[in-house]
Image: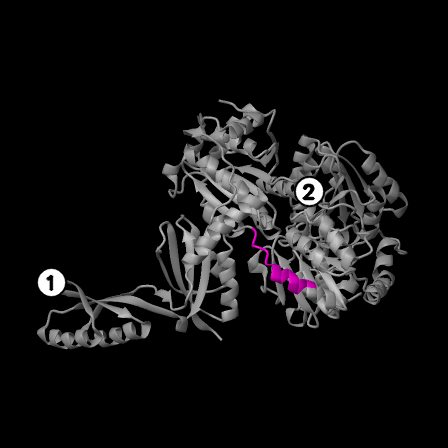
Amino acid sequence: MKKPFTIVVFTENKIGLLNRVTSTLIQRHINIESLTVSESEFPGIHRFTIVILEEEEKVQKVVKQIEKQVEILKAYYFSDEQTAFAEIALYKINSASVAKEEGLKSLILKHQLKELSKEGEFLILEKTGKKEETNQVFEELKPFGLLGFVRSGRVSLSKMIGSFSGHLQEFELHSKEIITKYN
Amino acid sequence: MKLVKEEVQDQLKKGQKPQRMTGAHAIIQSLLAESVDLIFGYPGGAIMPVYDALYDYQDVLKHVLTRHEQGAIHAAQGFARVGVKPGIVLATSGPGATNLITGLADAKIDSTPLVCITGQVGSQLLGTDAFQETDIISISMPVTKWNHQVTKAEEIPDAIAKAFHIATSGRPGPVLIDITKDAQFAELDFLYKKCKGFRSYIPIPKLKQESIDQAASLIDVAKKPLILFGQGVILSQAEQVFKKFVEKTGIPAAWTILGLSALPTEHPLNVGMLGMHGNYGPNKLTNEADLLIAIGMRFDDRVTGKLETYGKNAKVIHIEIDPAEINKNVFADVAVLADARDALLALLDKVSPNEHIEWHDQFKKHMALEVEKVISKELNPEKDGLTMGEVVKRVNDVTKGNGIVVTDVGQHQMIGCRYAKFSQSKSNVTSGGLGTMGFCLPAALGAKLARPDREVIAIIGDGGFQMTIQELGAIFQTKAAVKIIILNNQFLGMVRQWQQLFFDKRYSSTELVNPDFITIAKGFGIEGKTVSERSSLEADIARMFEHNGPYLLEVMVDKEDNVFPMVPTGACVSEVRLD
């Protein structure tokens, strides 16, 4: 059965690696639901967070194929239960009329929306949360005349023990061992 | 400014000061530092500075001018497959670079080490649709093990060092370095340092002793074990220890077509070829085996047939260097992630000697049936028309298993792999994974240049020959003494066979009206002869080998012969058909 999975990939910071990762997914005809690229907690190492909807067996195989690529340090996959995750959504509305403002205030309170910007008649609100939550806000803001909407890719951190830093030390050690053994 | 190979190596040893030179010279110096002495390529605008630099090094660095970039890369593949060095390819930007794609894909799937260097338009022109500009980095990404664009001269030595390390280590593969023209012209302080590794690339997984112990205990209790060996045995130079392992355990060993020649064909424990047109016994008995020991092979669908019913009575030990191959197609009860040689060395001490006599008898019985139903008809036909198999048999009579046999793709390839005899490793060159028609002729040229001391026999179909026929020009120019045998059935034979068996004999676009190949060869200064009579075949083959230089022998074989045994697509390996 297809389920959402979050693939987390740690890579060297190099042009073109995103292409290599996505082309591995494309080869297996897997669609990307969301994608976030950012720096990781380690200098010079980037972190890709990719959400896909797939069967676990296929995810397992594609993750190995991603991980084996040169300059990719490690790839993991997680089910939704194994990670803490969120997305950011921004909403642009026209807040000109007073009547609207009253209704808006209660919505802002109810959903803990953040006022990101207010330029003249235009208000930009921010909501951080799961997709269902940002969708709920979308629905409730609709009557106010939504002028713009954007949602980020998922960011997530694993709830599990064990971290990438341990692997990183292992890689550095192992690559040294290989160098001494095979050269 | 000019350094010869020894000087570059001296520079490395003595830790000498960097030398000022252009990027183009740095490319050549880097290649020399990696002990390159032969390049295949084709010049053009964006790679001209490198070709200009090459002019100064003709005495130490030979360049083979093929007639098409695809020819260059297939030649480099042939060179790498039979030799000890990676194949090196030079090409220009745009069409020069895109013409490499088929060869890159072929080398990627067949794990062949290649270092390809392409010229690129000046960095200021990148992305402007400049003349002969193409985004070769993006285009080649899925078909390279690694690729990299260089826009600054000072990045050249490190990029090339990394390219060589990646291409040749772990599971080998093709890499591509794209170098802008301004980087070739600009100057740098050149100092070459070989790359020995870096953190985000683990070429060889760490061998886990417990996996060896588990594998050994499965091997010791198995009653009907079968070894499936692939190119990993050759790539890890494990032939000797592999042979010892086979002999100690007494386990029948069957090969994939990339594994062919890793164990001598005549070895009593070599039970033949796996897969679609493989031998009857190995296919049929895969499903009777209680243990499959896969060594350096990846369970390609041409080997396994229908996965749902593949090897269902067997536990599986998978010895493999690439973690992504484990459980990809066939579940491994024990995965030994390692270089095949390391794994076999560790395993050899652990396993107990055995003979498996009854199990062997089953292979012998299956072989006897196959000889009766298929092999005798192919090798000693009673009909008038010539068969492909009898031609291969005549070649064996001359080479005694010491030749390098290069095949193209199709019926002749299957016949070549089935019947050619090999007594030494690295002797079978064919396009296995990608099935690239047109591979053979240039690959044979590359193989001959890597091993001028050995006979190189190119066995090609009349279809595939015409896909890269222009490389007769490169063979003529290099005088490489390749012995070319066209097995001419005036059909795209394998497709025709499928049309006959599975598409109701509807021969759609498979019949070829061929040119006079001997006249064409003559135009390229290559002697040749057509043979269609059994009575002269032996003498004609002898003459081909006696001839000093390249030779083309066109053998007219029966038009509608089929290759058997055959596991139809989607069928189970034990449903292998003898007719």
Residue B290 located left or right of residue A116: right
Residue of label 2: B82
At x 71%, y 67%, the residue is B291
Could you classify mark 1 by the number of other residues whose Cα lies within 10 Å: few (under 14), some (14-19), or many (20 or more)? few
Please state which of residues B568 and B107 is positioned toward the viewer in this rendering: B107
The spot of residue B186 in percent (x, y) is: 41, 29
Specify whether residue B115 is in view.
yes
On the image, the x and y values in percent for residue B164 come to 54, 41
Residue that label 1 marks = A120
Residue B538 lies, with reference to residue B574, above or below; the image says above
Please report, as a chain letter, where disc 1 is located: A
Q: Is residue B401 above or below residue B383?
A: above
Circle 2: residue type: Val
Q: Secondary structure at mark 1?
A: loop
Task: Tell which of B31 and B547 is nearer to you.
Answer: B31
| Image-quadrant location for residue B302 | bottom right
- Boundaries of the magenta span: B204-216
A117 to the left or right of B188? left
* Residue type at numbered disc 1: Gly
The percent coordinates of residue B265 (x first, y second) are 79, 52
**Residue B210 lies within the magenta run:** yes
Quadrant in the rendering for residue A82: bottom left
Crowd class of label 2 (few under 14; some 14 to 19; many from 20; radius 10 Å)? many
Q: Secondary structure at mark 2?
A: helix
Distance from the alpha carbon under mark 2 to that under mark 1 = 74 Å
